[in-house]
Image: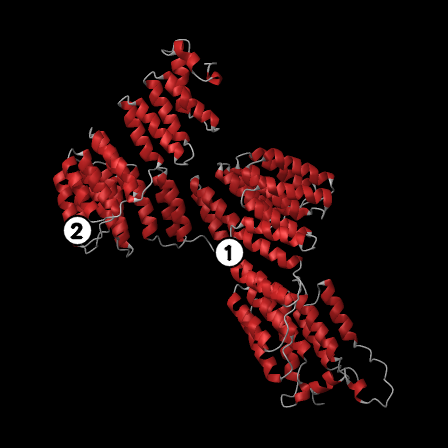
Amino acid sequence: MSSRPRLSSIFAASTAASTTTTVAASPARPLPPAYAAFQERLRSGTLGPDDARHLFDELLLRRDDPAPAPAPARAISDILAALARAPPSAACSDGPALAVELFKRMDRWACPHAAADAPTIYTYNILIDCYRRMHRPELALAVFGRLLRTGLGPDVCSYNTLIDGFSKEGEVDKAYELFYKMIEQSVSPDVVTYNSLIDGLCKTKEMVKSERVLEQMVDAGIRPNNKTYNSLIYGYSTAGMWKESVRVFKEMSSSGLIPCVVNCNSFIHALCRHNRIKEAKDIFDSMVLKGPKPNIISYSTLLHGYAAEGCFANMNSLVNLMVSKGIVPNHRFFNILINAYARCGMMDKAMLIFEDMQNKGMIPDTVTFATVISSLCRIGRLDDALHKFNHMVDIGVPPSEAVYRCLIQGCCNHGELVKAKELISEMMNKDIPPPGVKYFSSIINNLCKEGRVAEGKDIMDLMVQTGQRPNVVTFNSLMEGYCLVGNMEEAFALLDAMASIGIEPNCYIYGTLVDGYCKNGRIDDALTVFRDMLHKGVKPTSVLYNIILHGLFQARRTTAAKKMFHEMIESGTTVSIQTYGVVLGGLCRNNCTDEANMLLEKLFAMNVKFDIITFNIVISAMLKVGRRQEAKELFAAISTYGLVPTVHTYNLMISNLIKEESYEEADNLFISVEKSGRAPDSRLLNHIVRMLLKKAEVAKASNYLSIIDENNLTLEASTISLLASLFSREGKCREHIKLLPAKYQFL
């Protein structure tokens, strides 16, 4: 058996001709047949791992030749490089990983003690690139270290590959460190180096650093190119700094660079993300007229912007323009269209596009089916969703986890639990992770909020049947549902159900139960649960104290509420500003305004930081018990605490002034709202109009109707209904109809 050749014989082959200058250069040795076979099968996508190993061995040593001669080193490196760049195929799903394996195979053939056997820097760079493509920059760094120890380099390509790898994995600090190490080692960064680092920094929104690197790039005499600017536009746009995106785009144009279609697309995307659709359309129109010509990504990006704004007319115009320009729509384009119409409940239109897509010879992909199926489930067309699911399977499109989750949720919402269980089993058989506790808890929570608590209980049973264990969140959602429908017995029984599977109720569970009893007028039961919780050693939070305090005040148990408040303070529980709001509001509603004022003054003296919600609670309570002067004084004090009245605050005060028929004061207060720079609020204006109309103050109501019109606000249904009843032929204000703005006089 012949011994294995040293790698030196392989790598030396490429330089043998230059070692003896006195001998005429011999003609290049023809490459072994295995080289051509390897490359051809790789190009056609038929090269599997076993074939690759066999052919690679032939390249290392042609065993069928009586005098075997290995392939030149460069040819072997080219094979590894081509394999690293090869797209996944049915025969080989991971080219870079296979290239790493073959490198190690080659390494084992070498004599480890002979320096001449070592791979070249070109081969090392290929290996580093393989690990970059495998998203394993830490392994690439290990190869980089080995390269340093050989004394061969590294060169700019080695650094670039590593910097790009770390940048793409979001490890920008390591990329930054390598960049400065590169400069220390007197390896000059090139445009690829700077672009990779700037791109990584922009993707992590480190825009200050990216600008610093850009300055270094320019100082080094390297001119930024389209890719550089594209990264900056993307970074600023995702960081919400769209004005900076505009600046960079203009800077690129003024520097003499002609924006390419990728630059323009990034800019359109940035503008659309920030609802600057008009500006995005201007850029797009400029591309159509002056170039670069928009591609399918340009059309899709603008279409997505229109879809987000619900601009269906503009969407249709864009589709027609694209067709007239001969641009063929792709899956993403169709998916945007289908999703836009489906999201707005226009399923018939969405389904027409879905059919048109197939008529044009394009098979819907997983995203398309997921969009259609989820939309059908959302509007209650479960049978149609299941039909589309079956169609998807029939034409060979594999259902994704998202598709299954949409269908299972649809089945759960419509009581089709047998089908839901069947779909879960199907997922598990296909090794697709089934929905977890969080998913089912969310469904239960949504059903229970609608009062569909029995269906929520059925979903919990389904969870258990499919091997899922309900958690505290699941039980809490179900308990909230029972409390909502007033079934406190079932809500309480859940405590035993939790104990049966080893789950201890926490303060949130007790809080839900206490809140349920309070809202259902069963304050004694709420107190019993609260005391039982304390007995079991569960410490109440300030939120739970707020619930029980509010319940006691609502039940007119003011003495018990004050006692509970003192217990809270003595227990060391933090008394939040929300707690003070509950106590102050409760005292005012129960005609204990003197005590409320005393507490308020005490809190002012303690420099307790009030929020506007607390002020609103106390003002509202004082107005309800007729303490209008104190309410006005408290309103006047808001600004002294560095707070700004909300729309709700103004609503409380203006409503009270109108009730008192202090119309001039009400008008002045509204004018002060406008002067503060606050945009007119539709709800406030509608409320004022209704109050004035009910007091037959038509002229005054007319003034506020004009303000609504001037600001393009909408009349609420209740306002329209009141206008119609008051100014119809039999309405009691019919004779004053001419006082209304002209547009309302048709009534």
Say which of 558 and 264 sits in front.
264
The residue closer to the viewer here, 122 or 605, is 605
Front-most of residues 185 and 677: 677
Q: Quadrant of residue 520?
A: top left
Earlier sequence position, callout 2 versus callout 1: 1
Identify the residue under disc 2.
569
In 3D space, how far apart are the residues under numbered discs 2 and 1 (Cα atoms)? 52 Å
**Res 361 seen here:** no
Q: Secondary structure at mark 1?
A: loop
Q: Residue at x 57, y 79 (%)?
A: 145
> In the displayed structure, would residue 600 be above or below residue 241?
above
Q: Position of residue 97 (x, y in %)?
A: 61, 70
Badge number at residue 363 = none
Quadrant containing the C terminus is: top left
Q: Which mark is residue 432?
A: 1
Residue drawn at the location 67% of the way across and 78% of the way down: 121
User: Judging from the image, what secondary structure is the residue with disc 2 in?
Assistant: helix
Relative to 289, 542 lies left or right: left
Residue 555 pos. (x, y %): 18, 36
Instruction: Using residue 470 as the reference point, say whether residue 243 is left or right of it.
Output: right
Tell me which amino acid carries mark 2.
Answer: Ile
